[in-house]
Image (spheres, rainbow, N blue to C red):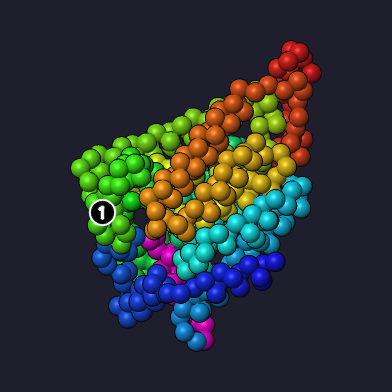
Amino acid sequence: MWVATRALVVADISHWQDVGNYEAWSHYLTAHHAMPGGESWQYPPGAAWLMLLPRLWPGAYGPAFVGLMLLCDLAGLGLLALLGRREGSYRGVWVWLLAMPLLGAFSLLRFDLVPTVIAIGALLVIHRRPGWFGALAGIGAAIKVWPVALLFGEWDRRRLLRAGLTAAGALALVVGVSALAFGDPMSFLDAQGGRGLQEEAVGTLPWQLKAIVAGDLPRRAIQYGAWQIVEPGAGAVATALELLSVAALGAAAAWWWLRAKAIGAGRAWLGGSSVSRDFVFTVVLLLVVTSRVLSAQYMVWLLGLAAVVLCSKDTRLSRPAWTVVAASALTTLLFKSPAAIASRDLLLLAATLDASLSMVGLLRRRRSHIDLPLDCPDAGDFVPAESESTGSL
């Protein structure tokens, strides 16, 4: 099934635009020993090393890059199969097999598969191997920033400290080596900070709905390598989205604290890895819908995390995960219709609200007995003071 579906995706490749940029940047890295300049370079330093890898393969850069992404895709399938076998559900495996091709060639012509598969590997070992969990989160963040959100999934302070230190160490290693090889590795932050409101972002819904109703397409221009809305008020919306992203991180931190407090009070079932994976999925959804930028390749992240969530038969977020799968089907239509953009973004907004409400409700939920999760390393040492339902064990 994997061979058949990926063969269809490869057959859909009709241009090498983004891969061509990666090839040009790889030549610049080796020729000038410096990070590429300009507003289009918006990637953490780990991405630079990733762009150099296809040059080690024989043959043309484009096919080599696609081959590398196919290997990464296959690794993701294997990790999900391991997780599904452990958690008792193979729904996530089928999502990876059948839903990822809905994105067409995007998944193989961008490098977002790499941090997504790294994130899947990290969530596979969450609560079990804090060192590996943190190292994978750090390496993923060195390629694309979003995998740092994985750390929200660890509720135990000792394990979180160890994971945080290894994540910081992995990230510092990549940054340090990149600084020695290519100079300033943080130059990408200038271009990232200057971006406006990309036409696919959820914040553009008012303009997309206006285009559907009145046929009045919003004015746009290519800036920072993407189409951005240049209508009056777009700058204010972009600023509001930045504030909402900060608020989302604050809300995630509050949920993390309340969860740890509830576990310490005896609700040990909240410490299960399925809850942690659900929470990470929710946090990333929040960051995506409040972002000024929502490129088509972001759906690779969300599909990967949805597949992780669906690998657990105990997940509380099956509906939001399937909503993300439905949104993926509209992604390849984004450049053809404002209706497709609006529909996709509304589905993502619905999935985010659904997941957020489910996670808030989970903290308010009570159980009639203490249910220690099998994957909680501290379960054997955990002695709750009293039951919440009867007042005693």
Q: Which part of the image, by quadrant, shows the N terminus?
A: bottom right
In this rendering, does residue 256 appear at all? no
Residue, disc 1: 220
Query: Does 354 sit above or below residue 336?
Result: above
Where is residue 48? Give x, y as percent.
41, 68
Q: In which quarter of the image is residue 316?
A: top right
In this rendering, does residue 43 appear at all? yes
Q: For the magenta stretch, what is the residue range?
A: 43-58
Among all residues in the image, which is located at the extreme right?
A: 393
Nearer the observer, 292 or 166: 292
Where is residue 50? Give x, y as percent.
46, 69
Query: Does 254 sit above or below residue 175?
Result: above
Among all residues in the image, which is located at the extreme left?
A: 232
- Helix, strand or loop under label 1: strand
Q: Main secondary structure of the magenta part?
A: helix
Q: Quadrant of residue 256?
A: top right
Q: For the point 52% across and 86% down, which residue is it?
A: 58
| Residue 48 included in the magenta stretch of the image | yes
Where is residue 375? Give x, y as percent.
73, 42
Query: Does 209 sit above or below residue 226?
Result: above
| Residue 49 included in the magenta stretch of the image | yes
Where is residue 30? Give x, y as percent.
36, 79
Nearer the observer, 30 or 119: 119
Q: Which amino acid does label 1 sit on?
A: Arg
* Side of 317 where 144 appears, left or right: left
Nearer the observer, 149 or 345: 345
Nearer the observer, 327 or 148: 327
Among all residues in the image, which is located at the extreme top?
A: 391
Please state the total of marks drawn on the protein image. 1
Query: Does 104 sit above or below residue 328?
Result: below
Q: For the point 33% across and 36% down, which residue is it?
A: 243
Q: For the point 77% across and 23% down, which residue is it?
A: 369
